[in-house]
Amino acid sequence: MGLFDLFRKKPKPAAEPAVVQETVVEPLEEAIVVPKEQPAEPVQTIEATEPVVETIVEEALPATPEVQQEEIVSTEEASVASEPVHVPIAITEPVKQDEPSPEELESKEELEKSLEKTKSGLFSKLTKAIVGKSTVDADVLDELEEILVTSDVGVNTTLKIIERIEKRVARDKYLNTSELNEILREEIQALLAENNSNDFENFEYGKQSPYVIMVVGVNGVGKTTTIGKLAHKLKAAGNQVVLGAADTFRAAAVDQLKLWGERVGVRVVAQDMGSDPASVAFDTVQSAAANGDDVAIIDTAGRLHNKVALMNELSKIKKVMDKIVPGAPHEILLVLDASTGQNAIEQCKQFTEATDVNALALTKLDGTAKGGVVIGISDQFKIPVKYIGVGESIDDLQLFNKKAFVDSLFHQ
């Protein structure tokens, strides 16, 4: 009995040191171990660790105040220094810069609207061609070839596009017909990128004084209207512009150019009907140089019935302008009517043989389903498409951008 009482009153030797030492000496270990031992209640464990850590730190600080305070301060400084405070600024700034301006959005909408007929015709035919098909096979490619040719892309350019897609089919082994639109889009854009169809960013001129543009093209393609719209755009960009009415074989051409000059607010140099076109071009460039104009635009006769006479006339005009401004004309702009399809390609061939055309303007894209001619002309002649007409308004002349053009053509 006495032995039992003695055993009952005996204290437990390991209780006091286990609690004191683990709590004081290793406070951070307890704070870390507790949540691991209680995974069933992670929310309660996290809430419980915060006051425990605060209590331990407060009790530990008096024991070694200088050392522990220095360690805590250095840890806080390191964490603050390591925080990438500049990251939010670096992320938000490019997003704001990439946002299109209202003018760019308006131009994009106008372009998409002008290509609506071309786009609807292309995709309706393409949809019918792949009905019931799951992969891009020989039959689908034959249908696609016919669709592109009938969209006035041109035979040679169409064959290039089909060949590119065939290589992708051979490489990837399997292509779904649902991917055909995107594949076609990529290949057309790549084809334009390989040609000289550069993107033009603005209507600002003035490095040459004056910068001389000679405009050629057959009657009825919208040549004089394009000159008027171009003069409007150039003037709005801050250029001083003068027009030369060198198409002296048609009285209506001279009168129409004068009307555009009054409408836009630019000077027009003209002579009587039947005058020598080279004489009008000479007077225009001479007047531009004397007046300090930035740009001189020369209209010429649009005749193709006699290529020899046309070539001689254009060569003469170029020579007289070069005498006043060396290197003039700096730009020979051929205006083509996109709605004529393959006829536009034939006209381009005739004029490039007659003179050194180095820029193209395609008009009336809004009224035709033959917008694919832009792709064919760019690929076949390696001449940059510089301007496109997307409507009848005075502002409906745009600088050509190949990516925007392809994006609008395939936008649904």
Image (cartoon, rainbow, N blue to C red):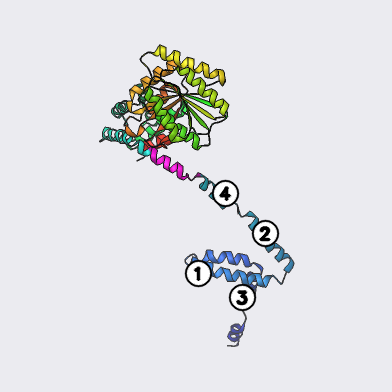
Q: Quadrant of residue 159?
A: top left
| Labelled pair 3, 4 in contact (Cβ < 8 Å) | no
Residue linked to disc 4: 90
* Mark earlier in primary sequence (3, 4): 3
Pointer 1 residue = 44
As drawn, is 51 to the left or to the right of 40? right
* Residue 158 image point, x, y percent: 36, 25
* Label 2 sits on residue: 77
Residue 21 lies, with reference to residue 144, above or below; the image says below
Q: Viewer-proximal residue, 292 or 30?
A: 292
Residue that extends furthest to the right in the rendered view of this protein? 66
Disc 2 element: helix
The span picked out in magenta is 98-111
Q: Earlier in the sequence, mark 1 or mark 4?
A: 1
Tell me the SS state at disc 3.
helix
Upstream in sequence: badge 1 or badge 3: 3
Q: Can you say whether 138 is above or below 307 in the image? A: below
Residue at 62% x, 82% y is 10
Q: Amino acid at mark 1?
A: Gln
Who comes first in sequence, dot 4 or dot 2? Answer: 2
Asked if the residues shown at circle 2 and circle 1 are in contact, with their CB atoms under 8 angstroms apart, the answer is: no
Q: CA distance from mark 4 to mark 2?
A: 23 Å
What residue did someone put label 3 on?
A: 15
Give yes or no for residue 118 being in the magenta stretch: no
Occupied quadrant, residue 352: top left
Instruction: Identify the mark nearer the N-term, 3 or 2.
Output: 3
Secondary structure found at label 4:
helix
Residue 376 appears in the rendering? no
Specify few, some or many for label 1: CA neighbours under 10 Å numbering under 14, 14-19, or 20 or more. Answer: few
Q: Are marks 1 and 4 in contact (CB under 8 Å)?
A: no
